[in-house]
Amino acid sequence: MINGIADFFQNLFSPVVNILGSVLLFFHQTIGAPWWLSIAMLTVVVRLLLFPLTVKQVKSMRAVQDLKPDMDRVRAQYQNNAQKQREEMTKLYQERGVNPLGGCLPILVQMPIFIGIFYVIRLFGGTPGRTEPEYPSFVDGGILWFQDLSQADPTYILPIISAVTMLGATEITLKNVDPQQRWLMRLLPVGFTVFLLSFPAGLFVYWITSNLVTLVQNYVIYNHGPGKRPAPDAKAQGNTTSTTSVSSASPNGSNGSSARDAAGGTGDAAAHAAKVAKRKRRKKKK
């Protein structure tokens, strides 16, 4: 039953499997890279091709985050009218040109590729007890402790590295996520890795490489790209600077006040001197 389902999906994703398999063979047979490195190189190429979608995803997520105050206002205003709330939300998205599902596109694109890589490894390395490897060298194409790319890692080191690298890539984005969602995002790598625990080592080579590329991309996007948030006090600091400049130039500013104080002080001294001179004249008359 399980093998029948696996064969069905292999046929369903056969176009993706054929493309990924051809690229993998190019790296191994033409360039001469070992199988494990060929998988890593294939992963880098795939992630670079998907990079524009990743940037678009971040921009879409940032746009939705910027809309949050208006969305909260709509929810509060129409909290007892779900239909009106949906209509106003849709209107708000259209007015701002925001697609709330834009952040899901890279994930939807990556899933067929991930499944395709799984079937490429299954095809090249064979299925124990069912099919022979199409390329016998693939079985011994690993490195270090995972020599057989078609078998699961018995030491579970690869799954642990996968979870750590995925968590590292996720942690960069958590500063832009609501606090109540952060722990869910942190638990996701653990759950995902447990699900993949018995998968072939070659698949983990793909996934770990993908996580490392994601980590680098997230660092660039969220520190130097569209995901970077302006400093919280930057706007306030700009307003303070403008106010200070206006106050300095204005006759009502501090410099104007100092001038008036100085003028007032000079006037008081002159009035006092006049009073003293007047008293002296009166004494002389007497």
Image: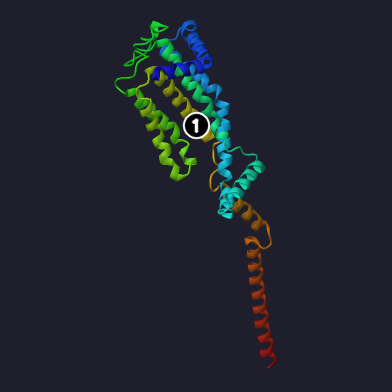
| Image quadrant where residue 264 sits | bottom right
**Is residue 40 in view from this perspective?**
no
- Badge 1 crowding class, 10 Å Cα cut-off, few under 14, some 14 to 19, many 20 or more, is many
Residue lying furthest front:
1
Q: Quadrant of the N terminus?
A: top left
Q: Residue at x 69, y 87 (%)?
A: 281
- In the picture, measured across the screen, residue 248 lies left or right of residue 157, that is right
Q: Position of residue 205 (x, y in %)?
A: 41, 19
- In the picture, measured across the screen, residue 243 lies left or right of residue 115, that is right
Residue lying furthest left:
155
Q: Position of residue 121 (x, y in %)?
A: 42, 14
| Image quadrant where residue 183 sits | top left
- Asked which colour scheme the image uses, the reply is rainbow
| Image quadrant where residue 150 sits | top left
Task: Identify which residue, 261 or 2, lies in the foreground.
Answer: 2
Q: Secondary structure at mark 1?
A: helix
Q: Position of residue 227 (x, y in %)?
A: 54, 36
Image vertical order of residue 66 relative to residue 284, above or below: above
The amino acid at mark 1 is Asn
Task: Identify which residue, 4 or 197, lies in the foreground.
Answer: 4
Q: Position of residue 243 (x, y in %)?
A: 63, 55
Image vertical order of residue 139 relative to residue 285, above or below: above
